[in-house]
Amino acid sequence: MTIGFPQNAVVTIAQHMKVAVAGISDLDPTGKAVFTRPLRPSDPAVSGGVFALDWRPDDYEIMGRPNGDPTLATYMLAIQILVKHTDEQEGLALHSETAKAVRSMLYRDAVLRVALTSLTESSLGVTERALKWGVGQQRYANNELNGTFLFLTTTELSLQTQTI
């Protein structure tokens, strides 16, 4: 079964995040995980999450299009990093390193670039393909719960597609 947009992008990014997160030092690999959903406080000490936020058409030209779909549309995805640590300074350092690794992956990973560029979905006589993407803002949230420091980063990624 072929996975369509936006889940095909979510799965592709999550696969590449597993490599990026695994390369982060400080914790053994069993304390790291990447999910295709929003993160939860019960997730492992270093966790990544990728999920779709919304979809919007970038044009509204229904008249004259044989399939009625907008030519261009944008999916918004969220990429989260959660770090839980008992030492605040060590947790901050690990969180900073991990958040930066994810940003670097989105900007510099040539294999991810090729994988995202090759995403397509064909159904009901139309083909949707990835056109371009960009990193939006990266937001940080810190908290402490029962002696454990929690650090969360959410990075927005827009993925524009074209329907032909």
Image (spheres, rainbow, N blue to C red):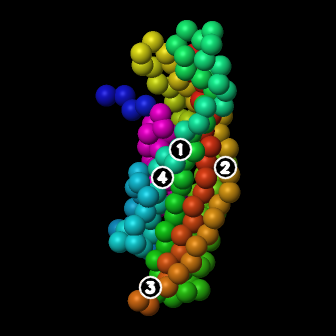
Residue 54: mark: 1
State how far apart marks 3 and 4 are (Cα): 24 Å
Q: Amino acid at mark 1?
A: Asp
Give residue 44's quadrant in the image: bottom left
Residue 54 sits above or below residue 128 on the image = below
Name the residue beneath numbered marker 4. 50
Q: Kindly tell me whether residue 66 is visible in this rendering.
A: yes
Mark 3 lies on a secondary structure that is strand
Camera-side mark, 1 or 3: 1
The residue most toward the bottom is 147
State how far apart marks 1 and 2 are (Cα): 15 Å
Mark 4 lies on a secondary structure that is strand
Q: Amino acid at mark 2?
A: Val
Name the residue beneath numbered marker 3. 145
Q: Amino acid at mark 4?
A: Val
Mark 2 lies on a secondary structure that is strand
CB-based contact (under 8 Å), mark 1 and mark 3: no
Q: Which residues are magenta?
A: 5-24
Mark 1 residue crowding within 10 angstroms, few (<14) / some (14–19) / many (20+): few
Name the residue beneath numbered marker 2. 135
State how far apart marks 3 and 2 are (Cα): 30 Å
Residue 132, horizontal then vertical, whole percent:
66, 34
Q: Amino acid at mark 3?
A: Leu
Give residue 125's quadrant in the image: top left
